[in-house]
Image (cartoon, grey):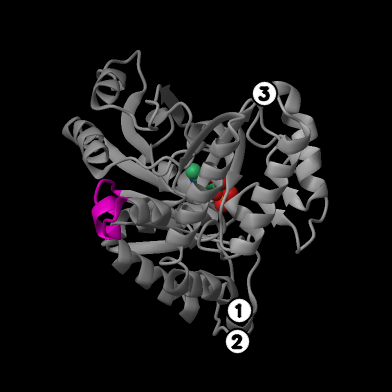
Amino acid sequence: MSLYSGMTRTGAVSERACDLRSDTVTRPDEEMRTIIATAKVGDDVYGEDPTALRLEAAMAECLGKEAAVFFPTGTQSNLAALMAHCGRGDEAIVGNRYHIYCDEAAGAAVLAGISLCPVTIEAGGQITPNTVASAIKDDDPHYAHSRLLCLENTVGGRVITLDKMRATSKVAKDHGLAIHLDGARFFNAITALECTPVALAGVADTVSVCLSKGLGAPVGSILAGTAKIIAKARRNRKILGGAMRQVGVLAAAGLHALENNVDRLTEDHRRAAVLAEALRALNVGTVCADTNMIFFTPAPRHHVSLRNHMAKAGVLIGGQSPSIRMVLHKDIDDVRLDQAITAFQAYYHDHQL
Ligand SMILES: Cc1ncc(COP(=O)(O)O)c(C=O)c1O
């Protein structure tokens, strides 16, 4: 069953719901809405939107890269990066559970003629150096050119250490490949690793960071890298239809998120650990938790009734099976967390195994 089962096309969700399906569900708060409403704007296709320029400069500096470009989505940012690194018939090596391979509708193949070479990831989410080494193809007319390694961190909420990222990245670099990091939850990763943004961004040539997940902006991703590669990515954004005009209204939300919502990610991680502990205490299924995500595997017969019970209690959980994903984010405070824990406890009080 897909990650998105029971998650999409459900209709409008009450603002009062405790929505644990994803960290993409956050809504801009009053402060962010005021900042959006008062943002300075210009035509960003002409390079004249002051707020987009500020956001791009701030992110480039934060990640220790020469340049950055604002995208509407992480999917488009990843694809524009792949297109900047690879030509038609080239190959990108990517983890077989990573978003670029599994969840981006094969855009690299459909729109860019890039072959994705999926490789097995470890239980912790990483691609090992040996796996990369054996996936890189010889320069032979039978084969695609191996041009790029795509990394991800965090992966399904699991954080990969800097040492592991660096070791894998080094093998690719030694073979002349470029490296792209899908850091949709980059700031969750650096929060868990307790490292600087520059340290994690340093493992890759290009880094894509989502503003619309744990950081709580309604829209947007940033791609950072060298000035040369970002110029290519900016052109690719135009090709993909993602060059926007008075985009400062969105960039302002991204800047606000970057300045105000990074430190609070520790709260999401703490709450994820609290919810995981509460589920473990019920002793009703396997619980895996890291950063802001929890994967809970109840007995199969409980899936539908548990989900319905939680929904009636105002708590939305994913419809995946066998493991249900729950994600902590800015709109889940301690009161809502208690609401979720109480609803789980009530269900298992009435439905003992
Ligand atoms: C790891 C990862 N990469 C990329 C994306 C794509 O982001 P977007 O939904 O903005 O296209 C997501 C979205 O959930 C993601 O989880």
The residue sitting at 60% across, 86% down in the picture is 38
Q: Earlier in the sequence, mark 3 or mark 1?
A: 1
**Which of label 3 and label 1 is nearer to you?**
3
How many numbered marks appear? 3
Q: Residues within 10 Å of mark 3 (few under 14, many from 20)?
A: some
Q: Secondary structure at mark 2?
A: loop
The residue sitting at 35% across, 51% down in the picture is 192
Q: Earlier in the sequence, mark 2 or mark 3?
A: 2
Left-right relation of 15 to 193: right
Give the residue type that dot 2 points to.
Thr
Q: Is mark 1 within 8 Å of ligand 1?
A: no
The residue sitting at 54% across, 36% down in the picture is 280
- Foreground: 124 or 148? 124
Q: Which residue matches tag 1?
A: 36
Q: Which residue matches tag 3?
A: 299
Q: Position of residue 115 (x, y in %)?
A: 45, 27
Which residue sits furthest top?
Answer: 142
The residue sitting at 30% across, 50% down in the picture is 193
Do we see residue 85 in this rendering? yes
Which corner quadrant of the image does residue 335 belong to? bottom right
Do we see residue 331 in this rendering? no
- C-alpha gap between disc 1 and disc 2: 6 Å
Q: Is residue 198 magenta?
A: yes
The image shows residue 132, relative to residue 180, as above or below, that is above
- C-alpha gap between disc 3 and disc 1: 45 Å
- Foreground: 33 or 92? 33
Q: Which residue matches tag 2?
A: 38
The image shows residue 216, relative to residue 48, as above or below, that is above
Which corner quadrant of the image does residue 262 belong to? bottom left
Q: Where are the magenta residues, as a range?
A: 193-205
- Foreground: 240 or 213? 213
Give the residue type that dot 3 points to.
Ala
